[in-house]
Structures are given as C-alpha cells and as structure tokens.
Image (spheres, helix red, strand yellow):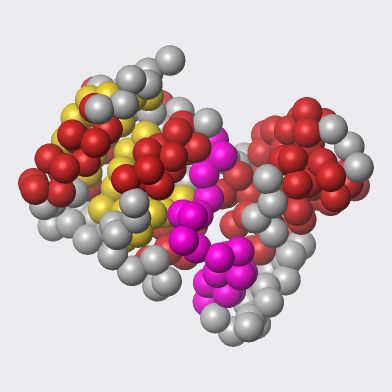
Amino acid sequence: MTIRVLLADDQALLRSAFRVLVDSEPDMEVVGEASDGAEAVRLAKEERADVVLMDIRMPGTDGLAATRMISEDPSLAQVRVVILTTFEVDDYVVQSLRAGASGFLGKGSEPEELLSAIRIAAGGEALLSPAATKGLIARFLAQGDGTETADPSRTARLEALTVREREVLVQVAGGHSNDEIAERLEVSPLTVKTHVNRAMAKLGARDRAQLVVIAYESGLVRPRVE
C-alpha cells in the first residue's frame, strides 16, 4: 500500500525538499502541498491523505488549529498528523498531542527519521520523534509541575477498561512498544495489540498518542518531573 502524504508548511523551499525525499520512497507519495492550515484541512479531504506533515507556525489557520479540525472531523478519521517543529521541547508539543496529533518531529531530524515517522504514523503507532525522551511525555503533559487535577470525564471513561487493559495502557503511557509490553506482562505481542485496540475503541482514541494523553489526563498515570 502506498502511503499518501500531505505537506503543510508555509516555506516553499522546505516543502520542495520534503517532496523530493518522500517521493523517492517506493511505498509513499506526496499528494498535495499546503501553505496554511485551512488549505491543509481541505487537501486532506480532497486528496485522501494518510499522513499530514504539519508545521505549527503558519499564517492564517495555524498547524495546531488545523490538527484539531482534522482530528474532530469523522470523515478524516484515517488521517494521521505528524507535527513538524523547530523546538521539540515546548508547549506546542503538548498542545499538538491534545489537539489530536499522532506525534511530532523536529525539523532538524535526519531524513531516515522523517521517513520512519511517516511509516509509523500511517500504522497508528506514532508518538514521539526518536530524539525525544520518554520522560518528556510526562513532563509536558503535566505542564511541568505535576499538579494537574485529573479530568473527571476521562477518569469515568477508564471504568470501561478491564484490569488487563488498564495495565497495558499504563505501559503504553510509558512509551513502551508492544514487544516490550509483552515481555513485561508475560503475554504475546498479539495479545498486547488486541488490548491496545480495545482500549482505543473504548476510550475513543485515534492512536497510541491519544492513549497516552488520556492516561495522564485521567490520572491513571502520574507524571514524573525530573
């Protein structure tokens, strides 16, 4: 299957560079380019994009607003957004995850990291760029102080999960892969995948990134600030 990629960045030079890189891969193709968020949302629908590489800072409708519009549109449920940011460690990262992004990647990443992120996002597995640490998830979802109050609506939704699904969710929130979770819980990777998929369905999460957000906002997992 060919991964259909949409590029959203107000810098034409960057878009051109990304296009050359993406189109050089046999399993993906660029299906459109957008210079602002509104255009990105429109093209995501028209071109049936699988993954949108979305810049945060764009004129008019910015990348954050566009990401939220995509994630809230049922007709775009298959679209995954990877945020491109100059600074990986800032509040935009948290906002983008909460807006529905599947992950983020620094603009200074290596070409192979970008291509890998596209493939991972297309498979619903994206969360953080290779350069980001697991501790970053907790630190920034907690807005840096670890004192956020759990969201009651999120907490209530956790009641639908089985004990095992909660255990798996805690591991997902720790940034662990299915194989790592399987080893930790002494089950098969396929069993872990089943639990992850059921948790996403019950919690209305688009992918693993959203599971992590829910895990922290519900208070199931407490952030550790180092």
Percent of width and height locating residue 122: 46, 32
155 displayed left or right of 47? right
Q: Residue 153 occupies which quadrant of the picture?
A: bottom right
Percent of width and height locating residue 172: 70, 51
The residue lying furthest to the top in this view is 1
- The question of residue 139 being in magenta is answered with yes
Q: Residue 203 occupies which quadrant of the picture?
A: top right
Instruction: Tell me the residue at 54%/81% (across/down).
Output: 144
Quarter of the image that includes the C terminus: bottom right
- The question of residue 144 being in magenta is answered with no
Instruction: Tell me the residue at 62%/40% (across/down).
Output: 204
26 displayed left or right of 132? left
User: Disc count in the image?
Assistant: 0
User: In the rendered image, is residue 178 in sight?
Assistant: yes
- Looking at the image, residue 203 lies above or below residue 10: above
Write down the region rendered in magenta.
124-143
Percent of width and height locating residue 138: 61, 69
Q: Main secondary structure of the magenta part?
A: loop
User: In the rendered image, is residue 64 in sight?
Assistant: no
Instruction: Tell me the residue at 27%/33% (across/down).
Output: 22
The residue lying furthest to the left in this view is 12
Instruction: Tell me the residue at 43%/15% (across/down).
Output: 1
The front one of 76 and 167 is 167
- Looking at the image, residue 223 lies above or below residue 96: below
